Protein backbone atom coordinates (compact mmCIF):
# COMPACT_ATOMS: atom_id res chain seq x y z
CA UNK A 1 0.00 0.00 0.00
CA UNK A 2 2.91 2.36 0.82
CA UNK A 3 4.31 1.86 -2.69
CA UNK A 4 0.93 2.83 -4.18
CA UNK A 5 0.88 6.05 -2.15
CA UNK A 6 4.50 6.68 -3.06
CA UNK A 7 3.43 6.80 -6.74
CA UNK A 8 2.59 10.53 -6.45
CA UNK A 9 6.15 11.19 -5.28
CA UNK A 10 7.39 9.15 -8.23
CA UNK A 11 5.26 11.29 -10.56
CA UNK A 12 6.80 14.42 -9.03
CA UNK A 13 10.29 12.88 -9.39
CA UNK A 14 9.59 11.99 -13.00
CA UNK A 15 8.51 15.55 -13.87
CA UNK A 16 11.52 16.96 -12.01
CA UNK A 17 13.85 14.71 -14.01
CA UNK A 18 12.12 15.59 -17.28
CA UNK A 19 12.34 19.35 -16.64
CA UNK A 20 15.41 20.06 -14.55
CA UNK A 21 17.94 17.79 -16.30
CA UNK A 22 17.92 20.39 -19.06
CA UNK A 23 19.36 22.95 -16.64
CA UNK A 24 22.51 20.91 -16.18
CA UNK A 25 23.00 19.18 -19.54
CA UNK A 26 20.75 21.24 -21.85
CA UNK A 27 23.55 23.31 -23.34
CA UNK A 28 25.85 20.39 -24.05
CA UNK A 29 23.07 18.35 -25.70
CA UNK A 30 21.26 21.25 -27.41
CA UNK A 31 24.44 22.40 -29.11
CA UNK A 32 25.27 18.76 -29.97
CA UNK A 33 28.50 19.01 -28.03
CA UNK A 34 27.46 15.86 -26.17
CA UNK A 35 25.26 12.93 -27.14
CA UNK A 36 21.96 12.71 -25.29
CA UNK A 37 22.71 9.12 -24.25
CA UNK A 38 26.00 10.13 -22.59
CA UNK A 39 24.40 13.15 -20.90
CA UNK A 40 21.38 11.15 -19.66
CA UNK A 41 23.56 8.32 -18.29
CA UNK A 42 25.83 10.72 -16.38
CA UNK A 43 22.87 12.78 -15.19
CA UNK A 44 21.04 9.70 -13.79
CA UNK A 45 24.20 8.36 -12.13
CA UNK A 46 25.08 11.62 -10.40
CA UNK A 47 21.49 12.45 -9.41
CA UNK A 48 21.32 9.06 -7.63
CA UNK A 49 24.72 9.56 -5.95
CA UNK A 50 23.81 13.12 -4.89
CA UNK A 51 20.40 12.06 -3.53
CA UNK A 52 21.67 9.03 -1.58
CA UNK A 53 24.83 10.65 -0.17
CA UNK A 54 23.77 14.24 0.38
CA UNK A 55 19.96 14.34 0.26
CA UNK A 56 19.30 14.40 4.02
CA UNK A 57 20.08 18.08 4.72
CA UNK A 58 17.37 19.78 2.72
CA UNK A 59 14.89 17.03 3.69
CA UNK A 60 15.27 17.89 7.38
CA UNK A 61 14.31 21.54 6.78
CA UNK A 62 11.28 20.45 4.78
CA UNK A 63 10.38 18.07 7.64
CA UNK A 64 10.48 20.99 10.12
CA UNK A 65 7.96 22.87 8.02
CA UNK A 66 5.44 20.10 8.44
CA UNK A 67 5.84 16.42 9.31
CA UNK A 68 3.10 14.72 7.28
CA UNK A 69 2.18 11.81 9.57
CA UNK A 70 -0.23 9.75 7.44
CA UNK A 71 0.72 8.03 4.22
CA UNK A 72 -2.47 9.13 2.43
CA UNK A 73 -1.71 12.71 3.45
CA UNK A 74 1.83 12.41 2.08
CA UNK A 75 0.34 11.02 -1.13
CA UNK A 76 -1.94 14.08 -1.49
CA UNK A 77 0.86 16.54 -0.68
CA UNK A 78 3.21 15.05 -3.32
CA UNK A 79 0.35 14.66 -5.81
CA UNK A 80 -0.77 18.29 -5.34
CA UNK A 81 2.76 19.49 -5.92
CA UNK A 82 3.12 17.28 -9.01
CA UNK A 83 -0.29 18.36 -10.35
CA UNK A 84 0.44 22.06 -9.87
CA UNK A 85 3.83 21.62 -11.56
CA UNK A 86 2.15 19.78 -14.43
CA UNK A 87 -0.70 22.29 -14.83
CA UNK A 88 1.53 25.34 -14.63
CA UNK A 89 3.96 23.83 -17.12
CA UNK A 90 0.97 23.19 -19.39
CA UNK A 91 0.01 26.86 -19.03
CA UNK A 92 3.63 27.73 -19.91
CA UNK A 93 4.35 29.28 -16.52
CA UNK A 94 7.84 28.85 -15.12
CA UNK A 95 7.48 26.49 -12.20
CA UNK A 96 9.51 25.12 -9.32
CA UNK A 97 8.91 21.77 -7.63
CA UNK A 98 10.50 23.17 -4.44
CA UNK A 99 7.91 25.92 -4.20
CA UNK A 100 5.07 23.58 -5.12
CA UNK A 101 5.90 21.09 -2.37
CA UNK A 102 6.18 23.83 0.25
CA UNK A 103 2.76 25.20 -0.73
CA UNK A 104 1.30 21.68 -0.58
CA UNK A 105 2.81 20.99 2.88
CA UNK A 106 1.37 24.24 4.24
CA UNK A 107 -1.99 23.12 2.79
CA UNK A 108 -1.68 19.88 4.82
CA UNK A 109 -0.65 21.85 7.95
CA UNK A 110 -3.74 24.02 7.66
CA UNK A 111 -6.05 21.08 6.93
CA UNK A 112 -4.69 18.97 9.79
CA UNK A 113 -4.47 21.90 12.21
CA UNK A 114 -0.73 21.40 12.63
CA UNK A 115 1.26 24.54 13.27
CA UNK A 116 3.53 25.81 10.51
CA UNK A 117 7.03 26.50 11.78
CA UNK A 118 7.30 30.18 10.92
CA UNK A 119 11.10 30.12 11.36
CA UNK A 120 11.46 27.28 8.86
CA UNK A 121 9.02 29.00 6.47
CA UNK A 122 10.88 32.30 6.72
CA UNK A 123 14.20 30.51 6.12
CA UNK A 124 12.75 28.79 3.04
CA UNK A 125 11.26 31.98 1.56
CA UNK A 126 14.47 33.92 2.14
CA UNK A 127 16.39 31.14 0.39
CA UNK A 128 14.11 31.32 -2.65
CA UNK A 129 14.96 35.01 -3.02
CA UNK A 130 18.64 34.44 -2.23
CA UNK A 131 19.00 31.51 -4.65
CA UNK A 132 18.78 33.40 -7.99
CA UNK A 133 20.57 36.44 -6.54
CA UNK A 134 23.45 34.34 -5.25
CA UNK A 135 23.57 32.38 -8.49
CA UNK A 136 23.73 35.66 -10.43
CA UNK A 137 26.57 37.01 -8.25
CA UNK A 138 28.55 33.75 -8.53
CA UNK A 139 28.00 33.73 -12.30
CA UNK A 140 29.21 37.34 -12.73
CA UNK A 141 32.35 36.80 -10.61
CA UNK A 142 33.12 33.43 -12.26
CA UNK A 143 32.56 34.83 -15.75
CA UNK A 144 34.88 37.77 -15.07
CA UNK A 145 37.59 35.42 -13.77
CA UNK A 146 37.21 32.91 -16.62
CA UNK A 147 37.19 35.53 -19.38
CA UNK A 148 40.21 37.30 -17.82
CA UNK A 149 42.11 34.00 -17.68
CA UNK A 150 41.25 33.18 -21.30
CA UNK A 151 42.38 36.61 -22.46
CA UNK A 152 45.65 36.34 -20.53
CA UNK A 153 46.41 32.77 -21.57
CA UNK A 154 45.71 33.34 -25.30
CA UNK A 155 43.81 30.08 -25.64
CA UNK A 156 43.44 28.77 -29.20
CA UNK A 157 39.86 28.77 -30.46
CA UNK A 158 39.77 24.97 -30.76
CA UNK A 159 41.53 24.45 -27.43
CA UNK A 160 38.92 26.70 -25.81
CA UNK A 161 36.21 24.64 -27.49
CA UNK A 162 37.77 21.48 -26.06
CA UNK A 163 38.07 22.98 -22.58
CA UNK A 164 34.45 24.20 -22.72
CA UNK A 165 33.31 20.68 -23.62
CA UNK A 166 35.21 19.18 -20.68
CA UNK A 167 33.86 21.99 -18.51
CA UNK A 168 30.26 21.36 -19.56
CA UNK A 169 30.71 17.64 -18.91
CA UNK A 170 32.19 18.20 -15.43
CA UNK A 171 29.64 20.89 -14.57
CA UNK A 172 26.87 18.61 -15.82
CA UNK A 173 28.03 15.88 -13.42
CA UNK A 174 28.42 18.34 -10.53
CA UNK A 175 25.06 19.91 -11.38
CA UNK A 176 23.36 16.51 -11.44
CA UNK A 177 24.89 15.65 -8.05
CA UNK A 178 23.73 18.98 -6.61
CA UNK A 179 20.27 18.54 -8.17
CA UNK A 180 19.91 15.08 -6.62
CA UNK A 181 21.18 16.30 -3.23
CA UNK A 182 19.02 19.41 -3.09
CA UNK A 183 15.81 18.41 -4.85
CA UNK A 184 15.32 14.83 -3.61
CA UNK A 185 13.63 16.41 -0.58
CA UNK A 186 10.85 17.65 -2.88
CA UNK A 187 10.26 14.19 -4.31
CA UNK A 188 10.21 11.90 -1.28
CA UNK A 189 10.75 14.27 1.68
CA UNK A 190 7.07 14.15 2.74
CA UNK A 191 7.11 10.33 2.80
CA UNK A 192 10.01 10.18 5.25
CA UNK A 193 7.94 10.30 8.50
CA UNK A 194 5.62 7.53 7.22
CA UNK A 195 8.26 5.38 5.52
CA UNK A 196 8.08 1.65 6.41
CA UNK A 197 11.75 1.09 5.52
CA UNK A 198 14.34 0.08 8.12
CA UNK A 199 18.05 0.84 8.28
CA UNK A 200 20.26 -1.79 6.66
CA UNK A 201 23.93 -2.68 6.88
CA UNK A 202 25.21 -3.74 3.49
CA UNK A 203 28.30 -5.76 2.63
CA UNK A 204 31.45 -3.95 3.67
CA UNK A 205 29.61 -2.53 6.69
CA UNK A 206 28.05 0.34 4.75
CA UNK A 207 25.12 1.78 6.62
CA UNK A 208 22.19 2.21 4.27
CA UNK A 209 19.60 4.21 6.19
CA UNK A 210 15.82 4.11 5.70
CA UNK A 211 15.96 7.67 4.38
CA UNK A 212 18.65 6.74 1.86
CA UNK A 213 16.52 3.82 0.63
CA UNK A 214 13.68 6.27 0.03
CA UNK A 215 16.06 8.71 -1.66
CA UNK A 216 17.28 5.92 -3.92
CA UNK A 217 13.70 5.20 -5.06
CA UNK A 218 13.04 8.91 -5.55
CA UNK A 219 16.23 9.40 -7.55
CA UNK A 220 15.33 6.42 -9.73
CA UNK A 221 12.05 8.23 -10.54
CA UNK A 222 14.03 11.36 -11.41
CA UNK A 223 16.29 9.21 -13.61
CA UNK A 224 13.24 7.78 -15.37
CA UNK A 225 12.14 11.35 -16.12
CA UNK A 226 15.60 12.13 -17.48
CA UNK A 227 15.64 9.07 -19.73
CA UNK A 228 12.07 9.20 -21.00
CA UNK A 229 11.24 12.87 -21.41
CA UNK A 230 14.18 15.23 -20.91
CA UNK A 231 15.59 14.98 -24.45
CA UNK A 232 13.13 17.40 -26.01
CA UNK A 233 13.39 19.84 -23.10
CA UNK A 234 17.18 19.64 -23.26
CA UNK A 235 17.19 20.40 -26.97
CA UNK A 236 14.80 23.36 -26.57
CA UNK A 237 16.22 24.89 -23.40
CA UNK A 238 19.77 24.10 -24.45
CA UNK A 239 19.43 26.02 -27.68
CA UNK A 240 17.90 28.98 -25.87
CA UNK A 241 20.71 29.10 -23.31
CA UNK A 242 23.30 28.31 -25.93
CA UNK A 243 22.76 31.65 -27.63
CA UNK A 244 24.70 33.06 -24.71
CA UNK A 245 27.83 31.24 -25.99
CA UNK A 246 29.02 27.89 -24.63
CA UNK A 247 31.40 29.61 -22.21
CA UNK A 248 28.58 31.62 -20.64
CA UNK A 249 26.47 28.46 -20.49
CA UNK A 250 29.33 26.68 -18.71
CA UNK A 251 29.47 29.49 -16.14
CA UNK A 252 25.67 29.43 -15.75
CA UNK A 253 25.67 25.67 -15.01
CA UNK A 254 28.60 26.16 -12.60
CA UNK A 255 26.83 28.96 -10.67
CA UNK A 256 23.59 26.93 -10.57
CA UNK A 257 25.40 23.85 -9.29
CA UNK A 258 27.32 25.76 -6.60
CA UNK A 259 24.11 27.32 -5.30
CA UNK A 260 22.23 24.00 -5.22
CA UNK A 261 25.21 22.38 -3.52
CA UNK A 262 25.51 25.20 -0.94
CA UNK A 263 21.86 24.75 0.05
CA UNK A 264 22.21 20.96 0.31
CA UNK A 265 25.61 20.09 1.78
CA UNK A 266 25.63 19.07 5.42
CA UNK A 267 29.44 18.79 5.29
CA UNK A 268 29.70 22.43 4.28
CA UNK A 269 27.25 23.38 7.00
CA UNK A 270 29.35 21.56 9.62
CA UNK A 271 32.52 23.18 8.27
CA UNK A 272 31.03 26.67 8.54
CA UNK A 273 29.80 25.97 12.08
CA UNK A 274 33.23 24.65 13.10
CA UNK A 275 34.79 27.84 11.74
CA UNK A 276 32.37 29.92 13.79
CA UNK A 277 30.62 31.20 10.66
CA UNK A 278 26.83 31.37 10.13
CA UNK A 279 25.70 28.17 8.37
CA UNK A 280 23.94 28.17 5.00
CA UNK A 281 20.34 26.94 5.49
CA UNK A 282 19.75 23.54 3.91
CA UNK A 283 16.65 24.12 1.80
CA UNK A 284 15.39 22.66 -1.48
CA UNK A 285 15.71 25.47 -4.04
CA UNK A 286 14.61 25.80 -7.65
CA UNK A 287 17.13 24.57 -10.19
CA UNK A 288 15.48 26.63 -12.96
CA UNK A 289 15.54 29.82 -10.91
CA UNK A 290 19.22 29.29 -10.08
CA UNK A 291 20.06 28.98 -13.77
CA UNK A 292 17.90 32.01 -14.66
CA UNK A 293 19.66 34.03 -11.93
CA UNK A 294 23.02 33.14 -13.46
CA UNK A 295 21.87 34.01 -16.99
CA UNK A 296 20.41 37.36 -15.88
CA UNK A 297 23.63 38.13 -13.99
CA UNK A 298 25.75 37.55 -17.07
CA UNK A 299 23.22 39.40 -19.23
CA UNK A 300 23.69 42.45 -17.00
CA UNK A 301 27.44 42.46 -17.75
CA UNK A 302 26.58 42.85 -21.42
CA UNK A 303 23.98 45.56 -20.75
CA UNK A 304 20.41 45.76 -19.43
CA UNK A 305 18.91 45.65 -22.92
CA UNK A 306 20.01 42.00 -23.27
CA UNK A 307 17.52 40.88 -20.65
CA UNK A 308 13.88 40.07 -21.26
CA UNK A 309 12.47 41.67 -18.13
CA UNK A 310 8.99 40.31 -18.83
CA UNK A 311 10.34 36.75 -18.55
CA UNK A 312 12.18 37.65 -15.35
CA UNK A 313 8.96 39.17 -13.99
CA UNK A 314 7.06 35.99 -14.87
CA UNK A 315 9.58 33.89 -13.00
CA UNK A 316 9.46 36.16 -9.96
CA UNK A 317 5.66 35.95 -10.10
CA UNK A 318 5.84 32.16 -10.02
CA UNK A 319 7.46 32.39 -6.57
CA UNK A 320 4.07 33.55 -5.33
CA UNK A 321 1.68 31.71 -7.64
CA UNK A 322 3.25 28.22 -7.49
CA UNK A 323 3.06 27.70 -3.71
CA UNK A 324 -0.44 29.26 -3.58
CA UNK A 325 -1.64 27.01 -6.39
CA UNK A 326 -0.17 23.89 -4.71
CA UNK A 327 -1.59 24.98 -1.35
CA UNK A 328 -5.13 25.25 -2.75
CA UNK A 329 -4.94 21.91 -4.62
CA UNK A 330 -3.51 20.18 -1.54
CA UNK A 331 -6.22 21.54 0.77
CA UNK A 332 -9.04 20.59 -1.63
CA UNK A 333 -7.68 17.10 -2.35
CA UNK A 334 -7.11 16.36 1.34
CA UNK A 335 -10.75 17.25 1.96
CA UNK A 336 -11.86 14.98 -0.91
CA UNK A 337 -9.68 12.04 0.17
CA UNK A 338 -10.81 12.30 3.77
CA UNK A 339 -14.48 12.83 3.18
CA UNK A 340 -15.16 11.01 -0.08
CA UNK A 341 -12.63 8.13 0.04
CA UNK A 342 -12.61 7.88 3.86
CA UNK A 343 -8.82 7.89 4.11
CA UNK A 344 -6.80 9.02 7.11
CA UNK A 345 -4.85 11.97 5.84
CA UNK A 346 -3.43 13.01 9.21
CA UNK A 347 -3.07 11.57 12.71
CA UNK A 348 -3.84 13.55 15.82
CA UNK B 1 29.70 10.92 -32.05
CA UNK B 2 31.72 9.75 -29.08
CA UNK B 3 33.18 12.29 -26.70
CA UNK B 4 36.76 10.99 -27.09
CA UNK B 5 36.37 11.23 -30.87
CA UNK B 6 35.78 14.98 -30.71
CA UNK B 7 39.07 15.59 -28.91
CA UNK B 8 41.07 13.29 -31.16
CA UNK B 9 40.00 15.34 -34.17
CA UNK B 10 40.66 18.74 -32.68
CA UNK B 11 44.46 18.67 -33.01
CA UNK B 12 43.87 17.56 -36.59
CA UNK B 13 41.74 20.56 -37.49
CA UNK B 14 44.12 23.07 -35.86
CA UNK B 15 46.92 21.64 -38.01
CA UNK B 16 44.75 21.64 -41.13
CA UNK B 17 43.79 25.30 -40.72
CA UNK B 18 47.46 26.21 -40.18
CA UNK B 19 48.44 24.27 -43.31
CA UNK B 20 45.64 25.90 -45.29
CA UNK B 21 46.84 29.38 -44.30
CA UNK B 22 50.43 28.38 -45.14
CA UNK B 23 49.26 27.46 -48.64
CA UNK B 24 47.40 30.77 -49.01
CA UNK B 25 50.55 32.64 -48.02
CA UNK B 26 52.66 30.54 -50.39
CA UNK B 27 50.29 31.29 -53.28
CA UNK B 28 51.02 35.01 -52.94
CA UNK B 29 54.76 34.39 -53.09
CA UNK B 30 54.42 32.09 -56.12
CA UNK B 31 52.24 34.72 -57.80
CA UNK B 32 54.91 37.43 -57.36
CA UNK B 33 57.65 35.10 -58.62
CA UNK B 34 55.53 34.02 -61.59
CA UNK B 35 54.57 37.54 -62.72
CA UNK B 36 58.20 38.69 -62.29
CA UNK B 37 59.32 35.78 -64.48
CA UNK B 38 56.76 36.81 -67.12
CA UNK B 39 57.97 40.44 -67.03
CA UNK B 40 61.50 39.17 -67.60
CA UNK B 41 60.12 37.12 -70.48
CA UNK B 42 61.13 33.84 -68.79
CA UNK B 43 58.06 31.98 -70.03
CA UNK B 44 59.28 28.54 -68.97
CA UNK B 45 59.74 29.73 -65.40
CA UNK B 46 56.32 31.44 -65.56
CA UNK B 47 54.74 28.12 -66.63
CA UNK B 48 56.44 26.34 -63.74
CA UNK B 49 55.06 28.91 -61.29
CA UNK B 50 51.61 28.60 -62.86
CA UNK B 51 51.71 24.83 -62.40
CA UNK B 52 52.89 25.37 -58.81
CA UNK B 53 50.06 27.78 -58.01
CA UNK B 54 47.50 25.36 -59.52
CA UNK B 55 48.86 22.52 -57.36
CA UNK B 56 48.84 24.75 -54.28
CA UNK B 57 45.24 25.74 -54.95
CA UNK B 58 44.26 22.07 -55.35
CA UNK B 59 45.89 21.19 -52.02
CA UNK B 60 44.14 24.15 -50.39
CA UNK B 61 40.80 22.99 -51.84
CA UNK B 62 41.29 19.52 -50.39
CA UNK B 63 42.15 21.01 -47.01
CA UNK B 64 39.16 23.37 -47.14
CA UNK B 65 36.80 20.45 -47.77
CA UNK B 66 38.38 18.47 -44.94
CA UNK B 67 38.09 21.46 -42.55
CA UNK B 68 34.42 21.96 -43.50
CA UNK B 69 33.75 18.27 -43.04
CA UNK B 70 35.41 18.18 -39.61
CA UNK B 71 33.68 21.34 -38.42
CA UNK B 72 30.23 20.08 -39.32
CA UNK B 73 30.56 16.36 -38.76
CA UNK B 74 32.29 16.72 -35.39
CA UNK B 75 30.15 19.77 -34.44
CA UNK B 76 33.21 21.74 -33.36
CA UNK B 77 33.08 25.43 -32.25
CA UNK B 78 29.28 25.60 -32.68
CA UNK B 79 29.06 29.32 -31.90
CA UNK B 80 31.70 30.38 -34.48
CA UNK B 81 31.43 27.55 -37.00
CA UNK B 82 29.55 29.57 -39.63
CA UNK B 83 31.97 32.50 -39.36
CA UNK B 84 35.04 30.27 -39.61
CA UNK B 85 33.61 28.50 -42.65
CA UNK B 86 32.94 31.82 -44.41
CA UNK B 87 36.47 33.02 -43.67
CA UNK B 88 38.03 29.80 -44.95
CA UNK B 89 35.91 29.87 -48.12
CA UNK B 90 36.75 33.50 -48.81
CA UNK B 91 40.43 32.87 -48.22
CA UNK B 92 40.19 29.99 -50.69
CA UNK B 93 38.60 32.40 -53.18
CA UNK B 94 41.51 34.83 -52.70
CA UNK B 95 43.92 32.00 -53.39
CA UNK B 96 41.93 31.30 -56.54
CA UNK B 97 42.35 34.94 -57.57
CA UNK B 98 46.16 34.57 -57.66
CA UNK B 99 45.68 31.57 -59.92
CA UNK B 100 43.12 33.53 -61.97
CA UNK B 101 45.50 36.44 -62.68
CA UNK B 102 48.27 34.03 -63.70
CA UNK B 103 45.90 32.13 -66.02
CA UNK B 104 44.77 35.43 -67.53
CA UNK B 105 48.41 36.28 -68.31
CA UNK B 106 48.94 32.75 -69.69
CA UNK B 107 45.85 32.98 -71.94
CA UNK B 108 46.16 36.59 -73.09
CA UNK B 109 49.97 36.89 -73.01
CA UNK B 110 49.69 40.73 -72.79
CA UNK B 111 52.53 42.90 -73.92
CA UNK B 112 53.69 44.88 -70.91
CA UNK B 113 56.16 47.62 -71.77
CA UNK B 114 59.25 47.88 -69.56
CA UNK B 115 58.19 51.38 -68.39
CA UNK B 116 55.18 49.84 -66.61
CA UNK B 117 57.12 47.06 -64.87
CA UNK B 118 57.96 48.88 -61.63
CA UNK B 119 54.40 50.11 -61.14
CA UNK B 120 52.99 46.67 -61.86
CA UNK B 121 55.43 45.06 -59.42
CA UNK B 122 54.42 47.65 -56.84
CA UNK B 123 50.72 46.84 -57.41
CA UNK B 124 51.44 43.11 -57.11
CA UNK B 125 53.33 43.71 -53.90
CA UNK B 126 50.44 45.73 -52.39
CA UNK B 127 47.92 42.99 -53.31
CA UNK B 128 50.09 40.21 -51.85
CA UNK B 129 50.87 42.23 -48.71
CA UNK B 130 47.17 42.87 -48.10
CA UNK B 131 46.50 39.12 -48.34
CA UNK B 132 49.48 38.38 -46.11
CA UNK B 133 48.18 40.83 -43.47
CA UNK B 134 44.75 39.15 -43.76
CA UNK B 135 46.35 35.73 -43.19
CA UNK B 136 48.11 37.04 -40.07
CA UNK B 137 44.81 38.51 -38.83
CA UNK B 138 43.15 35.15 -39.40
CA UNK B 139 45.88 33.27 -37.53
CA UNK B 140 45.44 35.71 -34.64
CA UNK B 141 41.65 35.16 -34.75
CA UNK B 142 42.26 31.48 -34.00
CA UNK B 143 45.24 31.75 -31.66
CA UNK B 144 45.26 35.16 -29.96
CA UNK B 145 42.14 37.21 -30.63
CA UNK B 146 43.59 40.31 -28.93
CA UNK B 147 46.20 40.59 -31.67
CA UNK B 148 43.77 40.64 -34.64
CA UNK B 149 43.58 44.45 -34.68
CA UNK B 150 47.40 44.65 -34.88
CA UNK B 151 47.30 42.96 -38.26
CA UNK B 152 43.94 44.04 -39.58
CA UNK B 153 44.81 47.75 -39.97
CA UNK B 154 47.62 46.66 -42.31
CA UNK B 155 45.08 45.03 -44.64
CA UNK B 156 43.35 48.38 -45.01
CA UNK B 157 46.68 50.16 -45.47
CA UNK B 158 47.81 47.81 -48.27
CA UNK B 159 44.40 47.94 -49.95
CA UNK B 160 44.61 51.76 -50.08
CA UNK B 161 48.14 51.49 -51.46
CA UNK B 162 46.92 49.00 -54.07
CA UNK B 163 44.16 51.44 -55.10
CA UNK B 164 46.72 54.23 -55.47
CA UNK B 165 49.08 52.02 -57.47
CA UNK B 166 46.23 50.76 -59.66
CA UNK B 167 44.93 54.29 -60.41
CA UNK B 168 48.43 55.55 -61.13
CA UNK B 169 49.19 52.63 -63.44
CA UNK B 170 45.89 52.93 -65.31
CA UNK B 171 46.54 56.65 -65.86
CA UNK B 172 50.01 55.87 -67.17
CA UNK B 173 48.63 53.24 -69.51
CA UNK B 174 45.85 55.41 -70.93
CA UNK B 175 48.09 58.47 -71.30
CA UNK B 176 50.66 56.48 -73.26
CA UNK B 177 50.36 57.47 -76.93
CA UNK B 178 52.41 54.51 -78.11
CA UNK B 179 49.80 51.98 -76.98
CA UNK B 180 46.76 51.04 -79.06
CA UNK B 181 43.34 51.25 -77.32
CA UNK B 182 42.84 47.48 -77.35
CA UNK B 183 46.16 46.99 -75.53
CA UNK B 184 45.28 49.74 -73.07
CA UNK B 185 41.98 48.02 -72.30
CA UNK B 186 43.66 44.65 -71.96
CA UNK B 187 46.18 46.07 -69.45
CA UNK B 188 43.42 47.91 -67.60
CA UNK B 189 41.52 44.64 -67.09
CA UNK B 190 44.68 42.95 -65.82
CA UNK B 191 45.40 45.83 -63.40
CA UNK B 192 41.80 45.79 -62.13
CA UNK B 193 41.99 42.02 -61.66
CA UNK B 194 45.11 42.39 -59.47
CA UNK B 195 43.62 45.33 -57.56
CA UNK B 196 40.52 43.19 -56.96
CA UNK B 197 42.63 40.82 -54.83
CA UNK B 198 43.36 43.64 -52.33
CA UNK B 199 39.68 44.70 -52.40
CA UNK B 200 38.61 41.17 -51.53
CA UNK B 201 41.13 41.03 -48.70
CA UNK B 202 39.69 44.28 -47.31
CA UNK B 203 36.10 42.93 -47.50
CA UNK B 204 37.27 39.88 -45.61
CA UNK B 205 38.90 42.09 -42.97
CA UNK B 206 35.60 43.94 -42.50
CA UNK B 207 33.80 40.65 -41.90
CA UNK B 208 36.54 39.49 -39.54
CA UNK B 209 36.17 42.68 -37.48
CA UNK B 210 32.52 41.74 -36.85
CA UNK B 211 33.39 38.11 -36.03
CA UNK B 212 35.94 39.36 -33.51
CA UNK B 213 33.27 41.45 -31.76
CA UNK B 214 31.01 38.37 -31.71
CA UNK B 215 33.74 36.36 -29.99
CA UNK B 216 34.79 39.07 -27.55
CA UNK B 217 34.36 37.96 -23.94
Image (tube, coloured by chain):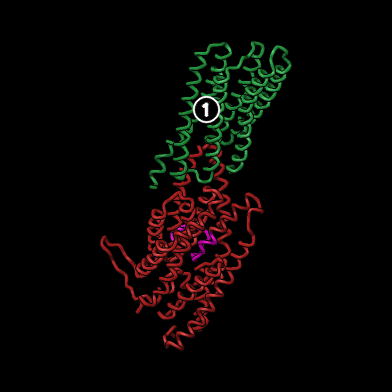
Q: Quadrant of residue B158?
A: top right
Residue at mark 1: chain: B
Which quadrant: the N terminus of chain A?
Answer: bottom left
Which quadrant: the C terminus of chain A?
Answer: bottom left
* Image height of B69 relative to A316, above or below: above
The magenta span reads A266-290
Magenta region includes residue A287: yes
- Judging from the image, what is the letter of the chain drawn in green? B
Q: Is residue A269 visible?
A: no
Measuring from the top left, give residue A213's x and y in whole percent: 35, 68
Which residue is at a point 61% across and 20% down the rendered structure image? B125
**In the rendered picture, chain A carries what hue?**
red
Measuring from the top left, give residue B9's x and y in whole percent: 41, 39
Horizontally, residue B178 falls left or right of residue A186, namely: right
Which residue is at a point 61% across and 61% down the rendered structure image? A312
Crowdedness near tag 1: few (<14), some (14–19) or many (≥20) residues, C-alpha within 10 Å: many
Which residue is at a point 57% across and 50% down the rendered structure image? A141
Element type where label 1 sits in the image = helix
Horizontally, residue A195 falls left or right of residue B167, namely: left
Residue under numbered circle 1: B24
Residue B170 or residue A281, whichever sits in front: B170
Measuring from the top left, give residue A298's x and y in whole percent: 59, 52
* Image height of A330 relative to B173, above or below: below
Residue occupying the far left of the picture: A203
Q: Quadrant of residue A145?
A: top right
* Image height of A136 relative to B151, above or below: below
Residue A249 or residue A69, whichever sits in front: A249
Magenta region includes residue A128: no
Amino acid sequence: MFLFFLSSGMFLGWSLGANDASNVFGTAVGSRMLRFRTAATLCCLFVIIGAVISGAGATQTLGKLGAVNAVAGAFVVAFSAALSVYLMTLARYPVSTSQAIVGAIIGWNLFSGSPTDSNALFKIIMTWIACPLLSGVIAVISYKIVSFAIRKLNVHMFKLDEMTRYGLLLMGMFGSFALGANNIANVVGVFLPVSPFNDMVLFGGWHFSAAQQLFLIGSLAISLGVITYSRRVMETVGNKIFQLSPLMAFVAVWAHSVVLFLFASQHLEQLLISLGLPPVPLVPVSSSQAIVGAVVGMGLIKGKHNIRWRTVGGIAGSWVTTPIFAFVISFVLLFVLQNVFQQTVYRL
Amino acid sequence: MSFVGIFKNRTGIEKEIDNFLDLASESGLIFIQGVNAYLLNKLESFDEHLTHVVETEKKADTLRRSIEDLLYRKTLIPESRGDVLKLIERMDALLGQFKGVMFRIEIERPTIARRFHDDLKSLNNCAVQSVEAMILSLRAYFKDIGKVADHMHKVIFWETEADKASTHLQKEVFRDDKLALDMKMQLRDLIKHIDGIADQAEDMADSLAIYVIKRSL
